[in-house]
Image (cartoon, helix red, strand yellow):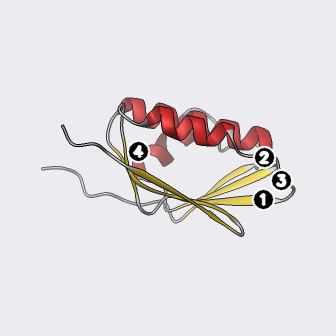
Amino acid sequence: MDEHRLTITITPDGWVIEGELDRHNTDSLLAWCESIDAVPGERILELAGLEILDAEGIAATIETIRRLLQRNPALIITHAPHLLSHTLYRIGLLEGGRLSLIEPRQEEPYG
């Protein structure tokens, strides 16, 4: 079995998450999120290098975003995978102005 790996980098403005996320490594994402301290001002979460491979990965990413919003007044997500962007819209997390998406990715459909 291939082990999927996540890399989380702290930047001056927020965080970059790269790698493949699925049911095998969602615990590491959620554990990282618990270690984040509250900071004033908006933060940026860069997801250009993140591939979410299954429903558990989507659920963990949504929970991570919720936890980040509990600790930060505003969050900007850049280059989010299409399915994540769509899910954030569908569950109403984009309402209220605290969470915004910049340049969500448009993946090619499988065919």
| Image quarter (top left, top right, bottom left or bottom right) of the N terminus | top left
Q: Nearer the viewer, mark 3 or mark 4?
A: 3
Q: Amino acid at mark 2?
A: Asp
Q: Amino acid at mark 4?
A: Leu
Q: Are marks 1 and 3 in contact (CB under 8 Å)?
A: no
Query: Which class describes the residues within 10 Å of circle 4: few (<14), some (14-19), or many (20+)?
Result: some
**Alpha-carbon span between mark 4 and mark 1:** 23 Å
Among the two numbered marks 3 and 4 on one chain, the one whose residue lies closer to the N terminus: 3
Secondary structure found at label 2:
loop
Report the residue that reaches farthest toward the bottom: 12
Which residue was labeled with disc 1?
42
Q: Are marks 1 and 2 in contact (CB under 8 Å)?
A: no
Q: Is residue 38 visible?
A: yes
Which residue was labeled with disc 2?
37
Q: Which mark is residue 86?
A: none
Report the residue at 78% width, 59% height from top: 42
Among the two numbered marks 2 and 4 on one chain, the one whose residue lies closer to the N terminus: 2
Q: Is residue 93 visible?
A: no
Which residue was labeled with disc 3?
39
Q: Amino acid at mark 1?
A: Glu
Q: Nearer the viewer, mark 1 or mark 2?
A: 2
Report the residue that reaches farthest toward the left: 111
Q: Nearer the viewer, mark 4 or mark 1?
A: 1
Secondary structure found at label 3:
loop
Q: Amino acid at mark 3?
A: Val
**Alpha-carbon span between mark 1 and mark 2:** 13 Å
Which residue was labeled with disc 4?
83
In front: 38, or 43? 38
